[in-house]
DNA sequence: AAACATATTGACTAATCTAGTCAATATGTT
DNA sequence: AACATATTGACTAGATTAGTCAATATGTTT
C-alpha cells in the first residue's frame, strides 16, 4: 500500500480523524459524499486531503481496503482464535471484539455494508469476498459448536438462531453504549453504563444456558 | 391536510411511487436529497412535484406527517388491539403488521428514524413524540404481559429481553424477505420464501414457549 | 542562519448540480 | 369549441462539486 504512504505517515490522531470523517460521509453513498464535508469534519485543509489521496475515488478505494484489512485482521482472524466449543462463549467474545472496533471506528461496519451495496465503484474482488467471509465466521462457530451440550427436544438450528438473535440484539445495545460513551463529554445525561450491560448480559447468558443446555452441562 | 390536496387527489399508484421515491432519497438526509433524483425515480416531471408540494421543504414536512400518521394508525393503534396477555403472540402479531407496512412503504421506518436524527427541520412536536410512542408500545406489551406464565427461576425482565431480541431478529429477516419478494420480478434467484419463514417461526415460537413458560402454560 | 525540502493551507475555478419557474402542451369537462 | 386544470421539461441563477496551485509554515541539513 505504498500508494498511500503520505497518509499513512501521519500521526494516529489525524489519521483516525480523517478515516472516521470519511467513512461517516461516504455512508450517504459515493456520489453524495462531499470532500468539503470530510475536510471540515476532519479539521484538515482541502489541499491536504488531495495531497494524501490524489482523488476522491482513491480515497474511497483506500477506505474500502483499509476497512477490509482491519475487519479481517482485528475481527475475523481474531475471532478464529476465540471460537470454542461453547457457542455462548464464542459469540460473546466475538461481540466484545466487535464493540472494541466500533469504538475506534464508529462507522466501519456500516461503511463496509454501504460500500458493498453502493456499486459506485467497480465491484472489487475484496468487497465481493466480504459476504462470504462474514458467513464463514458464523459457519466456523456453528461447525465447531458442540451440539451435544444442547437439550434434545429442540432442533439445534432453532436454539442457535435464538441465541444468535439475542446476542446480536445485545451487541447492538452494548456497541451503541460504547460508542456513545467514547465520544461523550460527560454531561449530566443519564445512561445505562457499559458495566451495567456486562452484568446484565451475564445473567442473560446464564438464562440461555439454563434453558437450552442439558442438565449436566449448565 | 388540505395543503396537500393536489397530491392527495392523485391515484394511489402515483402517490405510492412518489412517496417511496421521496422517502428513499431523503434517507441520505434532507440536504443531500435531490428533487431531480426523486422525480426520476417516481417517473413524474419536475414541474409536477412542485405543483403538488410547492417546495422541497414542504415535501419533506408532508412525508414526516404522512409517515407518522400511517405508523400511528396502521401500526401503533392497531397494535393496541392486538396486545394479549400472551407476550409471544403479541410480539408476533406486531411483527406481521410491521411487515405488511414495510411491503407498501419499504423505507418508512428508516425514513422516520433518519428524519428524527437529521435535525434539518425544526424539531416538530410530532417527531419528538415518536420516540415516546415507540417506547409506549413495548411498555403496553410488557405491562399487559402475564408474567405468571413464565417460569420462576429466571427474572421476567431477562425472559422478555431474550424473546424481544429473537422476535426482532426474525422480523428483520421476514421483512427483508417480504420487501425483496414484493419488488421481485421472479428471476431465477434462490430465496427462502416467505412461507418458509412463517413455518420456521412457529417452531421458534414453540421453542420459546417450551423453555420459558411454566409447565402448565405451554 | 541560510538554504533546502516537504507539509499544509485556503482562495480559486470550471464544471456540474441545485431548487424552483414558466410557457407550452396534454387531458378532461362543460 | 371553449374553458379549466394537470403535466411536461427546457431553463435559470445560485450553490456545490472535485481538484489546483501559489503562498505559507514547518522541519532538516549544511
Image (spheres, coloured by chain):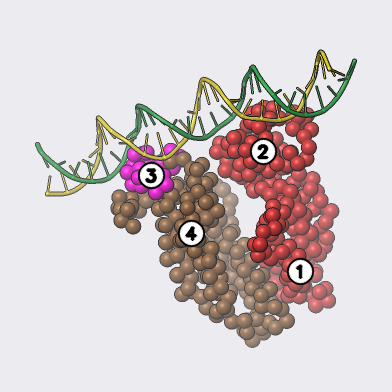
Chain colours: A red, B brown, C yellow, D green
Q: Residue furthest bottom?
A: B216
Q: Tag on residue A199?
A: 1
Judged by depth in the image, the label closer to the viewer, 3 or 2, is 2
Query: Are discs 2 and 4 located on one and the same chain?
Result: no
**Residue at (77% x, 30% y) in the render:** A5
Residue at mark 4 to residue at mark 1: CA–CA distance: 34 Å
Q: Percent position (x, y) of residue A217? A: 83, 73
Judged by depth in the image, the label closer to the viewer, 2 or 4, is 2
Q: Percent position (x, y) of residue D15? A: 48, 34
Judged by depth in the image, the label closer to the viewer, 1 or 3, is 3
Q: Is residue B51 left or right of residue A54?
A: left
Count neighbours of disc 1 (C-alpha within 10 A) and say few if under 14, some if 14 to 19, many if 20 or more: few
Q: Can residue B141 be found in the magenta stretch?
A: no
Judged by depth in the image, the label closer to the viewer, 4 or 1, is 4
Mark 2 vs 1, N-terminal side? 2
For the residue labelled by badge 3, is the local secondary structure a helix, a strand or a loop?
loop
Above or below — where is B210 with respect to B103?
below
Count neighbours of disc 4 (C-alpha within 10 A) and say few if under 14, some if 14 to 19, many if 20 or more: some
**Residue at (69% x, 65% y) in the render:** A192
Chain ID, mark 1: A
Amino acid at each position: 500500500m505504498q500508494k498511500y504512504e503520505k497518509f499513512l505517515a501521519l500521526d494516529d490522531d489525524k489519521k483516525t480523524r480523517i478515516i472516521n470523517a470519511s467513512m461517516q460521509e461516504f455512508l450517504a453513498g459515493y456520489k453524495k459524499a462531499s470532500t468539503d464535508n470530510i475536510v471540515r469534519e476532519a479539521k484538515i485543509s482541502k489541499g491536504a486531503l488531495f495531497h494524501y489521496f490524489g482523488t476522491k475515488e482513491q480515497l474511497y478505494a483506500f477506505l474500502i481496503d483499509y476497512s477490509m484489512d482491519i475487519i479481517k485482521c482485528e475481527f475475523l482472524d481474531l475471532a478464529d482464535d476465540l471460537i470454542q466449543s461453547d457457542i455462548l462463549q464464542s459469540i460473546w467474545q466475538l461481540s466484545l471484539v466487535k464493540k472494541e472496533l466500533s469504538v475506534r471506528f464508529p462507522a466501519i461496519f456500516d461503511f463496509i455494508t454501504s460500500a458493498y451495496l453502493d456499486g459506485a465503484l467497480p465491484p472489487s474482488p475484496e468487497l465481493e469476498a466480504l459476504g462470504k467471509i462474514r458467513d464463514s465466521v458464523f459457519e466456523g462457530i456453528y461447525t465447531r459448536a458442540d451440539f451435544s451440550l444442547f437439550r434434545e427436544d429442540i432442533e439445534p438450528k432453532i436454539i442457535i438462531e435464538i441465541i444468535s438473535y439475542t446476542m446480536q440484539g445485545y451487541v447492538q445495545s452494548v456497541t451503541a453504549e460504547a460508542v456513545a460513551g467514547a465520544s461523550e463529554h460527560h454531561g449530566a445525561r443519564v445512561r445505562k453504563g457499559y458495566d451495567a450491560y456486562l452484568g446484565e448480559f451475564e445473567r442473560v447468558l446464564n438464562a440461555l444456558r439454563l434453558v437450552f443446555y442439558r442438565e449436566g452441562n449448565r
